[in-house]
Image: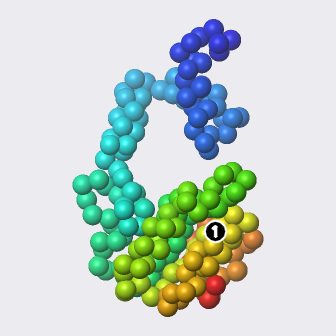
Amino acid sequence: MIDKIPALAQLCKVLQQVPFLASKNLYKVTTYFLESDQEKIERFCLALLEAKRDIEQCVMCCVWKARDQQCVFCDNQKRDQTIVCVVETWQELMAIEKTEGYKGLYHVLGGALCPLDGVGPEDLTINILLDRIIKNNSIKEIILATNQTPEGEATAAYCAMKLKDTDITVSCLARGMPVGAVLEGLDKLTVYKALAERRPF
């Protein structure tokens, strides 16, 4: 049926390319867009185009920032410039920020090591992190706040290995977090406790 309606087939094909859109929800999302009024669709498209045009990654911490503004983390002198929390994605960063208990800086790796999916160290921002540490003598501690999954643990171990010859303290989140847990899905108290009770890696 869909193949006989080219515009519908094209819309479904484009939506299928969204990585985290479950296939079982494909038709629901398609229906949402088709049933939305013209003005809502135009606002959606405009917001997407403006975001793509006006948002970029900070060259230092790799967190999203407004293209014509300073980074809200790196350039905020009220934050502790001596500590950097390393996370896989900005979703984990948001989970930590919601606790309101961490006031240091961040570094977003852009994912986790996963050889089976072809993701190696060169596909992440680990080298940017290392360069950042070399150039910034004020950094005293790195918190490896990767997810406690096999991929997250491997990524943390790799980063720790790269940092072992430095004078920087390397810590990780407390093991009180459930094994296999993803930061984004935890309540803020659990995330806050894990940060507060961090230990040497």
Name the spot of residue 52 as percent of width and height, x first: 37, 43
Quadrant of image for the C terminus = bottom right
Quadrant of image for the N terminus = top right
Name the spot of residue 75 as percent of width and height, x first: 29, 72
Residue lying at the far bottom of the rendered structure = 167
47 or 31, which lies in front? 47
Q: Is residue 164 above or below residue 48?
A: below
Q: Residue at x 62, y 44 (%)?
A: 20
Image side of residue 170 versus residue 44, left or right:
right
Image side of residue 71 versus residue 3, left or right:
left
Name the spot of residue 64 as percent of width and height, x first: 40, 57
Label 1 sits on residue: 155
Image side of residue 70 versus residue 39, left or right:
left
Residue lying at the far left of the rendered structure = 68
Q: Is residue 27 above or below residue 3?
A: below
Q: Is residue 184 visible?
A: no
Q: Alpha-carbon neighbours of circle 1 within 10 Å: few (<14), some, or many (≥20)?
A: many
